[in-house]
Image: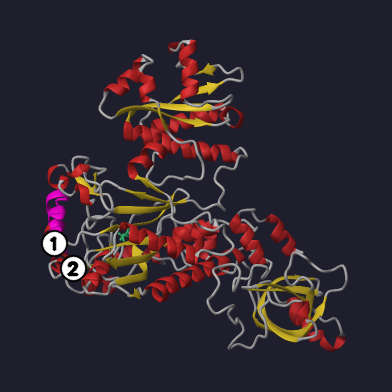
Amino acid sequence: MPLRLLCGTLRRTAAAAAAAAAAAGGRRRLGSGAGPRSARGAPDFSSFVARTNTCGELRSAHVGQKVTLYGWIQYQRQGLFLVLRDFQGLTQIIIPQDEARSHVKELLSSAPVESVVRVTGVVSLRPPGQENPKMPTGDIEVKVETAEVLNSCKKLPFEIKDFIKKSEALRMQYRYLDLRSFQLQYNLRLRSQIVMRMREYLCNLHGFVDVETPTLFKRTPGGAKEFLVPSREAGKFYSLPQSPQQFKQLLMVGGLDRYFQVARCYRDEGSRPDRQPEFTQIDIEMSFVDQNGIQRLIEGLLQYSWPEDRSPVTTPFPSMTYEEALADYGTDKPDTRFGMKIVDISDFSQRLGIHFVQNALSYPHGTVKAICIPQGMRYLRNKDFESLKEAARSQFNQEIVDIICRPDGSLKSLLTKFLGQEQQSELIQELKMQVDDVVLLAAGEHKRVCSALGSLRLESADLLEAAGLVLRDPAVFHFLWVVDFPLFLPKEDNPTELESAHHPFTAPHPSDTSLLYSDPTKVRSQHYDLVLNGSEVGGGSIRIHNAELQRFVLEKVLKEDSEVLSHLLDALEFGAPPHGGIALGLDRLISLIVGAQSIRDVIAFPKSFRGRDLMGNAPDYVTAEELEPYHIQVSWPVAEAEAKKN
Ligand code: ASP
């Protein structure tokens, strides 16, 4: 049976198991068990249409009933039977063999796979021994009496089966076919149910108001690059907002008190892996709230909307400061599902008298740190260690020294020639090394050392997992708050200037406000990020609601032209309430819940890596006449552009 093949070949991840269950047609029905349960019970999937049941619904209790099913032909065998598929599952359909219904046989056995058909017939038990326990409808089959081919399917570019490998470009070009797969059906339906539960929680349980904010706005300072949209006023452009940030704050000034929106956001960041130029946020803002209030709200929201068949989330989520995250994990989005934390051995190293170590420690922010790869010698090869060291060199300009604990307990490393027997034992103790462990050690500037070791920690985990160890179970969910970020960070391209770590509207930590005027680099902020399994899934802050402070931050610290934000600065002077908020990245959150390889797998019509719609071929050329009202000319001849189009 193709179904058995389908079930057997899927990867055994949580998502694949879910998809297999969905493919099996209702063991974990999308209408009920797969996602958060609807407040009013399972929906009626056959209301308003002529079908009596879906293809995932029929059981032995239906035996004897006359039913009408609509679906796509998944498989057809020698004019004897076919498997009909819809969003909910698969049903075996027995093709009549008697003379009187030869036209039905002719119709169904000649219809190509993926043709869409109606069948009407009687539900009967499968003959003994022919039941399929892997299929929820596996006890029954439908004996067809009448059938109709509603639309035939031409030759397919790829088979609609999850286990068939196809390139992502082809999947995107024929996205409407890819959407027929159980995996994508599952992902999109689960997404819809989670969003529904979020709406219930926010609006019905906590009085939030769902407000749509404009997507045509103007360019504003800071943050990601925005897409421009031409206007009919010469030289003037709209901008697509990278988030509804200003509007949600203005809604608070407008007394809306609690706002939320399933908001479409746009960022023109070029090709970045697993980013989309348009994406969706669950965008939230509240008046009279503090950081703790927002955090408890989000924990409640996630708990309420969390799918019942995933391992439950427990609240409150643990919390870690930005400094701790950087020191222990080398990143502001630590994956806390596994150990291998960064260990500081500066004090210990100070005593060793090794020249390059002493040298590193003599600089400001100099440090010596290490990570220990447990059982590294058993699972990794020499070339793995070489590639780890090379990655640290090329990405972080950081040298790494490895230390191996041999089976006899002695150390192998270029450091050993500087160390006596006693010091080697001390080092083993300091790093808690066991036989076959491998330590990667780095000496240098704090941030660089932490970032390099943080990255090596993740790469080593990849290597260990490729060798068969499970360190990061995708079915386990580790939420984490990261707090106490610096308010400003040095700009990447010009470290003498500052930029906001979150965005320019973020309020300073109350105990650091005075530092703003003396040493802004030392100010911590009221910015919080939500991290799930090493990915940032949300971020927000308590906002500046004082116009004078906001103007100071924009003009004096960030050196921005505050005039572009005069509407917001103005609004803050009209009795703006204290307020704060957060945005959850819906695409990433759902992709982690379903264990998808990419956020594209939870978006119905995603863009390619280069930001293109491969199905409709967007962006596309327009003619000179179409550009005229916008006072725009393409610098290379439009004629040439049009020629390219054809
Ligand atoms: N607008 C912010 C963002 O998109 C979230 C927030 O501060 O609420 O990251």
Dot 2: within a 10 Å radius of its alpha carbon, few (fewer than 14), some, or many (20 or more) residues? many
Name the residue: 13% across, 43% down. 518
Q: What element carries label 1?
A: helix
Count every numbered label the image shows and give the total.
2
Q: What element carries label 2?
A: loop
**Residue at which label 1 appears:** 547
Q: Vertical placement of 423 versus 487: above or below? A: above
Q: In the image, is the residue at mark 1 within 8 Å of ligand 1 by its beta carbon?
A: no
The chosen color scheme is secondary structure
Q: Vertical placement of 644 versus 83: above or below? A: above
Residue 429 magenta? no
Magenta span dominant secondary structure? helix
Left or right of 598 in this view: 628: left
Left or right of 514 in this view: 491: right
**Residue at which label 2 appears:** 576
In this rendered view, identify the residue nearer to me: 526 or 389.
526
Q: Vertical placement of 477 versus 344: above or below? A: below
Inspect the image, locate mark 2, and give the three-letter code of the amino acid beneath it. Ala
Q: Is residue 162 visible?
A: no
Q: Give the range drawn in magenta.
A: 549-565
Q: Are marks 2 and 1 in contact (CB under 8 Å)?
A: yes
Question: Sequence-wise, which precedes: disc 2 or disc 1?
Answer: 1
| Rendered location of residue 446, percent (x, y) | 32, 32
| Rendered location of residue 195, percent (x, y) | 46, 69
Left or right of 129 in this view: 387: left
Dot 1: within a 10 Å radius of its alpha carbon, few (fewer than 14), some, or many (20 or more) residues? some
> Mark 2 to mark 1: distance in Å?
9 Å
Q: Is residue 582 visible?
A: yes
Inspect the image, locate mark 1, and give the three-letter code of the amino acid beneath it. Ala
